[in-house]
Image (spheres, grey):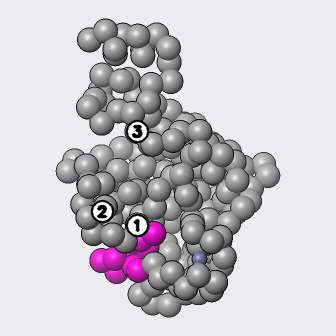
Amino acid sequence: MNKLAKINDILMCPSCRAPLLTSKDARECTICKASYPVLNKKSLAFITDPDELKANYIWKQVFDYDYGSYEQIILNKHAGEVILEVGSGINTLKNTKYENVILLEIYPYPTTDVVCYAEKLPFADNSVGGIFCSATLEHVKNPFTVMAEFVRVLKPGGHIKIDKSAPYLQAPDLLYIFCPIQKAQYLSQ
Ligand SMILES: [Zn+2]
């Protein structure tokens, strides 16, 4: 299965928003000539600085849980369309079971399809049928920019499913708490 082939037509340079040319080992911007390599023959990387990638490495744990009922509804409704999972962690089950779900992370884990920041998605406007974002939005640098990106890349009629984890589960790399009650509890600890 070549998941990257499914997204060649909808990729966009995250720097200048131009279309990308496809080669076996990289994607090259047609305007600014930036080159985005395929790492480990699998992960298309829009973050290429080795020190930055090293700093982004968090997970050691493999999470092999399947999608829940809300995601299944979206998967059925948008079968055949590209669906993004933003902040997928390492999940071998999702990686192999769902050919149209592209797994995004900020580090090239063994199950990562695209390495990028959620604030700068390398996808064209109105190009994906669905977006899953689970226990991730509270960790990004700018959740409002991320939400604007979700709206930008989602096709009309597309669906987004977002959830968050409890703050105490995700310390210390937690950046944002959306619920005011949980925020007060977290800060009083
Ligand atoms: Zn470019």
Q: Name the secondary structure under disc 1.
A: loop
Q: Residue at x 20, y 50 (%)?
A: 60
- Single out the residue that lies furthest toward the bottom: 23
Task: Considering the whole magenta stretch, tell me its main secondary structure.
Answer: strand
In contact (CB < 8 Å): disc 1 and disc 2? yes
Secondary element under disc 2, as helix, strand or loop, is helix
> In the image, which disc is placed on residue 184?
none
Give the image location of residue 61, x and y in percent.
Answer: 22, 47
Answer whether residue 184 is visible to the viewer in this image. yes
Percent of width and height locating residue 100: 55, 64
Residue 98 visible? The answer is no
The structure residue drawn at horizontal position 33% and vertical position 69%, both measured from the top left corner, is: 49
Q: Which residue is under mark 1?
A: 47
Please tell me whether mark 3 sits on a helix, a strand or a loop.
loop
Would you identify the image quadrant in which residue 186 lies?
top left
Of residues 158 and 53, the one nearer the viewer is 53
Q: Earlier in the sequence, mark 1 or mark 2?
A: 1
Q: Give above or below for 56 relative to 71.
A: below
Q: Which residues are magenta?
A: 37-46
* The image quadrant in which ligand 1 is located: bottom right
**Disc 2 crowd, CA 10 A, few/some/many (<14, 14-19, 20+):** some
Q: Which residue is mark 3?
A: 139
Q: Which residue is mark 2?
A: 53
Question: Which badge, 2 or 3, is on the more N-terminal residue?
Answer: 2
| Amino acid, disc 2 | Leu
